[in-house]
Amino acid sequence: MSTSPTQPTRTTSAVSDTSTKTPTPHRGFDNRDIARIAVFAALIAALGLMGPIPVPGLVPITAQTLGVMLAGTVLGGRRGALAVIVLLLLVLIGLPLLSGGRGGPAVFVGPSAGYLFGWIAGAFVAGAITHAGGRIVWWRTLLGAVVGGILVVYLFGVPVTSMVAGLPLSQALVSSFAFLPGDAIKAVLATLITAGLWKAYPQAFPARMQLAGQ
């Protein structure tokens, strides 16, 4: 009695692509990102509560903008900007978290309102520049702190001061120069703190930066 030839068993040799691809870092926000944003919003608030710091020969320095720079250089553009937004929302509902114990809706229509909105854009730009290379390097951090934390903030702040206070734009610009030395000091401090944190505690940075630094 003849038997039919055994049919060859079909085997699948292909392996699912998902098992062979190298996992990529998640681009959304996780619980750790939310915690980082909250921590930096609190840091900016705490630096504002310190009050102006007298410096011989210079206009007294307010440390709050140092927190804005750090939010960008450490957290990156989106997360840094969100940390500033969280702080400003708390200020909007009346919490006195700005330098000098200021808070409430009135601060968003005063002469310094442009600087507050500039903080959001400034933190974003500082973070975008600092994190552009996937690793923290001092010169890019300093560039981010200067461009985002100073130039962008002034770009928002000076025109609003001019408009609200009724000053010529040139006069508002010249009056802002008194704060440049203090802001330059804060940019250097932000660079040193960010570089030191990158070496000592890289977990403070977003996950994609931690993977790039490995």
Image (spheres, helix red, strand yellow):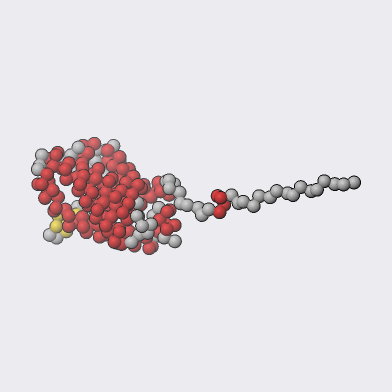
Q: Can you give x and y, in whole percent of width and height, for residue 15 in the image?
A: 60, 51
Q: Residue 141, relative to residue 79: is it above or below? A: below
Residue furthest right in the image = 1
Left or right of 168? Residue 115 is: right
Left or right of 11? Residue 32 is: left
The C terminus, quarter of image: bottom left
Q: Can you give x and y, in whole percent of width and height, for residue 86 in the image?
A: 32, 43
Q: Can you give x and y, in whole percent of width and height, for residue 113 in the image?
A: 20, 41
Q: Quadrant of residue 91?
A: top left
Q: Quadrant of residue 201?
A: bottom left
Residue ID at (12%, 59%): 57
Q: Nearer the viewer, residue 155 or 184?
A: 155
Q: Nearer the viewer, residue 162 or 182?
A: 162
Q: Quadrant of residue 94?
A: top left
Residue ID at (34%, 45%): 82
Residue ID at (19%, 56%): 182
Q: Residue 44, relative to residue 55: is it above or below? A: above
The answer to whether residue 46 is seen in the rendering is no
Q: Can you give x and y, in whole percent of width and height, for residue 84 in the image?
A: 30, 45
Residue ID at (19%, 48%): 154
The answer to whether residue 169 is seen in the rendering is yes
Total labels drawn: 0
